[in-house]
Amino acid sequence: MNIVVCVKYVPDAQSDRTFNDSDNTTDRVGVDGLLSELDEYAVEEALKIVEAGEGEVTVLTVGPDQAADALKKALQMGAHQAVHVNDPAIHGSDSVATSLVLAEAVKKIGTPDLVMTGMASTDGTMSVVPAMLAERLGLPQVTFASELTVDGSTVTIRRDGDAASETIVASLPALVSVTDQINEPRYPSFKGIMAAKKKPVQTWSLSDLGVDPSLVGLEAAWTKVESFTKRPPREQGQIVTDEGDGGARLAEFLSAQKFV
Amino acid sequence: MAEVLVLVDHANGTVRKTTAELLTIARRLGEPSAVFVGDGFDAAKEALARYGAEKVYRVESPDVTGHLVAPQAEVLAQLVASASPAAVLIPSNSAGKEIAARLAIKTESGLITDAVDVQAGEGGGVRTTQSVFAGSYSVTATVTKGTPIITVKPNSAAPEEAAGAAADEVVSIEVSQAAKGAKITESKPKEATGRPELTEAAIVVSGGRGTGGDFSKVEEFADSLGAAVGASRAAVDAGWYPHTSQVGQTGKQVSPQLYVACGISGAIQHRAGMQTSKTIVAVNKDEEAPIFELVDFGVVGDLFTVLPQATEKVQAAKG
């Protein structure tokens, strides 16, 4: 069972994320970045599957130089090798172009039994790249998995929607995205951290993938950010301490605001 | 006038409020054509007509409903090709975004997700507004290629009634083998709580670690206000409330008129899910809790005494 896990290097959500004035793209340099938290669940699940049988986990990312840190974390967790697609022409790509580059990279790696992703990135939070990737690779998509089992030729997941909890089955090869409910990602062990230093990391450019640069990047995007405005921080209103009447005062406030 | 396709969000014919919102938005951009997939059209027709659907494309094939997402994208792609709409509006839930994603690739069109507002652009086209980076930035954007495909968040428009013809036509679709790759083999419907749906509700009352697992006071308070009940990630991880009720970065992002956080400290993960709410209130024993930085009104106190008192006062006021 060979698995490719697609991961993303994102600005730290705990920091003050912002946009570049020059081209309205997300500032990926001024803010510290890391492996997207939601991708850790995908890496962990891939490792569990492979550890229960045979096979290898390859982590793949498309990103600038610093994105290598995302791969490093995954390798420290136990992934076997990594691929970094790094090309300045990719800057400013939309989800459509990102999925194109990822798809070509997956094909070059050799489309595995399972392509896995997290449920969304923590910066764009679109949750669309996995579906686009499945569409491009012609794979069934089995997404938002909160529980997953693989048996040789099929993958079965449980997905908790708003209206119902569903069991979904797909035959392999397939694309699976996982939620943060599926497992507890491991912390890299000291042994894992040392071993990661020796694991192979390949770096590919667009020409290595045979992707025409005019199909990616800011100019090629099918959507355009026209403006960004920082929302003013909320001003703190009134805080009262309960001295036996806290609930009554809360109800009064709601009344005054016409919620009651 | 160009058509605007609206994918109907329904459960066996009961049309959700989001559909009324999307039809209202569609009227700004062109003539709304609802796309109804599955059973229950007869129950839905009246609601679709009431909010302005001029046409309804009906898709009833079990090949579409029995498989996840991909067949719905094929149906919409077929309709985009035949109707050349000005835009396609889809609800911003997990299935909706995936349908939109596949549709964007199939029709070579730009995709904008989680729009909180959609207006006709100057000189044609569509302009969207999104709230990004946990609500700290507002972004406007347009689609520059193909048919704009927009997923729209709940509570993005006040539904406006406008009588439409809702003239239905059955769409026949040959679902490709490739689209049948993921089959739904079992579906366990969630028990109805009788409360509004979390992302659509005008008022949300959430409970966190401070409840210690006992949500009864939170629920009673919510019920006095006719509110939906949400939960913090800590509460969900502890197994106290289902993941579908989780408000936060990895759960639902809500933007109701009123959000009441009870026993919730207000970590970034949670704030990302609710900080664009119009009015925010918190009840927490800890006066240093970060949630208090966001509130319009806060009570430092034990939710087990504050909430019951508040519930009683609210019930009395309502008579």
Image: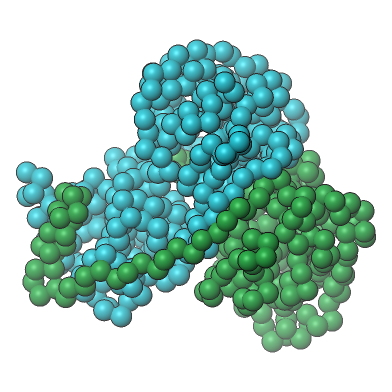
Chain colours: A green, B cyan
Depth check: give the residue in front, B99 or B125. Answer: B125
Residue at the extreme front: B123
Q: Residue at x 47, y 21 (%)?
A: B53
Instruction: Determine which quarter of the picture holds residue B206.
Output: bottom left
**Image: B303 above or below A135:** below
Viewer-proximal residue among A69 and A213:
A213
Work out whether residue B151 can be spotted.
yes
Q: Position of residue B153 (x, y in %)?
A: 47, 45
- Residue visible at 13% across and 68% down? A246
Residue A252 placed where, x, y %? 12, 59
Task: Give the vertical position of B65 relative to B54 (above or below).
Answer: below
Q: Is residue B23 left or right of residue A75?
A: left
Residue A114 in sight: no
Q: Across the whole image, how many numbered discs are drawn on residues?
A: 0
Residue B277 location (% of width, % of height): 36, 56
In the image, taking residue A30 as reference, residue B9 lies left or right, namely left
Q: Position of residue B70 (x, y in %)?
A: 67, 35
Q: In front here: A180 or B184?
A: A180
Q: In the shown orientation, is residue A69 left or right of residue A160?
A: right
Residue A128, placed above or below residue B207 = above
Residue A101 occupies quadrant? bottom right
Indicate the quadrant containing the C terminus of chain B: top left, top right, bottom left or bottom right: top left
**For the point 57% across and 56% down, which residue is it?**
A227
